[in-house]
């Protein structure tokens, strides 16, 4: 089994590009065209969207908490922190 290396190269001479194409035609190397950053971001967003849809299908789609629920939770956490801070004094 031979080792496989992945390299990033910058072609500075057009002759080098022809040599690389010749190596690829002999099946000595493989050339992957770089993806544009926009396509990469689009693919990541599509993956994220699929993951969200899968999560919602598995766990349901809960309603976001109301402002009253958020305020009640913040007050509860503050009470607990205040009580903990007073105990350590």
Image (cartoon, rainbow, N blue to C red):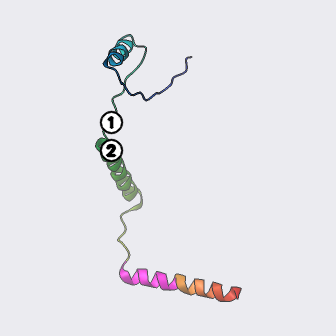
Say few, some or many: other residues with alpha carbon within 10 Å of mark 1 (under 14 / 14 to 19 / 20 or more).
few
Residue 67 on the magenta span: yes
Sooner in the amino-acid sequence: mark 2 or mark 1 = 1
Mark toward the viewer: 2 or 1: 1
Question: Residue 67 location in percent, x, y?
Answer: 36, 81
**Labels 2 and 1 touching (C-beta < 8 A):** yes
At a point 33% along the width and 50% down the height, the residue shown is 45
As drawn, 22 above or below 78: above
Query: Would you identify the image quadrant in which residue 62 lies?
Result: bottom left
- Where residue 41 appears, x then y in whole percent? 33, 47
Along the line of sight, which residue is nearer the eye, 8 or 62?
8
Q: Quadrant of the N terminus?
A: top right
Q: Residue at x 32, y 48 (%)?
A: 46
| Quadrant of the rendered image containing residue 3 | top right
Q: Is residue 3 above or below residue 63?
A: above
Q: Secondary structure at mark 1?
A: loop
Residue 7's place in the image compared with 70, above or below, is: above
Camera-side residue of 29 and 82: 29
Q: Position of residue 54 (x, y in %)?
A: 38, 53
The residue tagged 1 is 35
**Magenta region, residue range:** 66-76
- The residue located at (41%, 81%) in the rendering is 69
- Which residue is outermost to the top? 26
Residue identifier under label 2: 43
């Amino acid at each position: 089994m031979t080792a496989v290396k992945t390299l990033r190269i910058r072609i500075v001479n057009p002759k080098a590009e022809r040599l690389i194409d010749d190596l690829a035609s002999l099946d000595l190397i493989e050339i992957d065209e770089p993806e544009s950053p926009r396509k990469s971001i689009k693919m990541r967003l599509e993956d994220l969207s699929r993951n969200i849809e899968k999560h919602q299908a598995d766990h349901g789609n809960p309603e976001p908490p109301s402002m009253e629920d958020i305020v009640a939770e913040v007050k509860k956490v503050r009470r607990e922190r205040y009580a903990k801070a007073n105990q350590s004094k």
